[in-house]
């Protein structure tokens, strides 16, 4: 089954491991390239069709090896935390931009064309102004993370035009679900808040809690990524992967309180530098090109699934 093997960079991480499960469940062979910086071996199953390479996407020779014998790639390996990129721009850049460029080169050399890429809503900065953000909204990367994601999109487009790569670029909005590491302060807000609430530990909100996010449950997102791997042809241009649904952190806390039946003390701290105020996806293009699970998982349902996992 070598010719249908999918390389998943960052496959031991939160989103990657759910995608790996889905690929294995439909009978595909999978190769994971991951440096385990935030991902975990325990996120991956034992399976004869799964190969794991431990290493860095910033290492071109390793990326060349990883791409060999694969039909397509899902490129998820990155420093996923906006705040971590603010704290360490150079380290982030190695993973988030050099990693993408290495992958483009390795794919060009070996003739692998299809690549699904995890870009981010962060590329829009604050240009959404509380409205649903469509793909042509001017870009305003406010952090090293957002700058590297936007630059990665441009490199992928160069390799498409120049070398026939087939990139499916998705701007993920805020993804949540089981295996989003709750232990790291750099993790996603839902995993941090639910874990602390479960343990009765105080919760810190950066800013007034009025900031909003478009939270997407991981299983819904994975369904779209699989369609992008399978599509016979891809239309050009990045696609927002969000639900056109805004939830403020204050609403999120209320929802966690409802699902758990209780909420610990909530304190407020300074807003994070470069933090986006409102983020909500227009998903017209997504619905034109792909099928979203109908109905998509609500924040309440997703919280229940996360707490049950
Ligand atoms: P994650 O931290 O769980 O996954 C990232 C994975 O990449 C980890 O397994 C990590 O060990 C690996 N990795 C990091 N640097 C690497 C390197 N240099 N070489 C090899 N492996 C490396 O985070 P996630 O939430 O699963 O994010 C996956 C992708 O989706 C990232 O590209 C992230 O930027 C993007 N994204 C995530 C969200 C979200 O809300 N979670 C939203 C937008 C975009
Ligand atoms: C998240 C993703 C990023 C993605 C982006 C797309 C993670 C870690 N980050 O960034 O990869 O590109 O969505 O929209 O998955 N907050 C608190 N208290 C906390 C933690 C966070 O108040 O303990 C606040 C933050 O200041 C922010 C909001 O919660 O306002 C969301 O933070 P976070 O989950 O880190 O996500 P983004 O920065 O939106």
Image: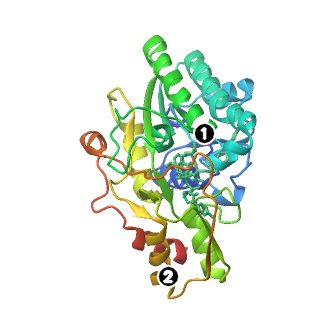
For marks 2 and 1, the one nearer the N-term is 1
Closer to the camera, 303 or 145? 145
Badge 2 marks a residue whose secondary structure is helix
Instruction: Tell me if the residue at label 1 has its CB under 8 Å from ligand 2.
Output: no
In percent of the image, x 46 and y 21: which residue is there?
157
Closer to the camera, 191 or 218? 191
Closer to the camera, 29 or 33? 33
Tally of numbered tags: 2
Q: CA distance from mark 2 to mark 1?
A: 32 Å
Question: Which residue is situated farthest in the top direction here?
Answer: 162
Compared to 229, does 201 lie above or below?
below
Q: Is residue 245 left or right of residue 167?
A: left
Residue 171 locus on image (x, y percent): 44, 41
Q: Is residue 42 left or right of residue 25?
A: right
Residue 16 locus on image (x, y percent): 57, 49
Q: Is residue 177 left or right of residue 288?
A: right
Q: Is residue 214 visible?
A: yes
In the rendered image, which residue does mark 1 sit on? 143
Residue 112 locus on image (x, y percent): 52, 24
> In the rendered view of the protein, which quadrant contains the C terminus?
bottom right
Compared to 131, does 151 lie above or below?
above
In percent of the image, x 46 and y 63: which residue is there?
210
In the rendered image, which residue does mark 2 sit on? 257
In percent of the image, x 44 and y 57: which residue is there?
213
Question: Which residue is situated farthest in the bottom direction here?
Answer: 261
């Amino acid at each position: 089954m070598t010719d249908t093997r999918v390389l998943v960079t960052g496959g031991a991480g939160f989103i990657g491991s759910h995608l790996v499960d889905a690929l294995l469940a439909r009978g595909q062979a999978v190769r994971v390239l991951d440096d385990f910086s935030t991902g975990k071996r325990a996120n991956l199953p034992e399976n004869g069709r799964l190969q794991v390479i431990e290493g860095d996407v910033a290492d071109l020779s390793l990326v060349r090896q990883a791409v060999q014998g694969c039909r397509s790639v899902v490129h998820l390996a990155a420093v996923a935390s906006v705040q971590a990129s603010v704290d360490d721009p150079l380290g982030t850049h190695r993973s988030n931009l050099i990693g993408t460029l290495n992958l483009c080169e390795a794919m060009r050399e070996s003739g692998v064309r299809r690549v699904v890429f995890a870009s981010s809503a962060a590329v829009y900065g604050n240009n959404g102004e509380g409205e649903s953000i469509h793909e042509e909204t001017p870009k305003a990367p406010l952090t090293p993370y957002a700058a590297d994601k936007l630059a990665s999109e441009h490199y992928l487009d160069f390799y498409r035009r120049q070398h026939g790569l087939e990139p499916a670029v998705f701007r993920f909005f805020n993804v949540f679900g089981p295996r989003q590491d709750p232990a790291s302060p750099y993790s996603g807000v839902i995993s941090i808040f639910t874990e602390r609430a479960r343990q009765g530990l105080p919760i810190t909100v950066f800013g007034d809690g009025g900031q909003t996010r478009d939270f997407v449950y991981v299983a819904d997102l994975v369904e779209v990524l699989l369609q992008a791997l399978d599509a016979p042809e891809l239309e050009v241009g990045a696609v927002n992967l969000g639900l056109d649904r805004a939830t403020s952190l204050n609403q999120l806390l209320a929802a966690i309180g409802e699902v758990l039946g209780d909420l610990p003390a909530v304190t407020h701290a300074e807003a994070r530098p470069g933090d986006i105020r409102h983020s909500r996806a227009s998903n017209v293009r997504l619905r034109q090109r792909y099928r979203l699970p109908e109905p998509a998982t609500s924040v309440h349902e997703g919280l229940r699934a996360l707490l049950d996992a």
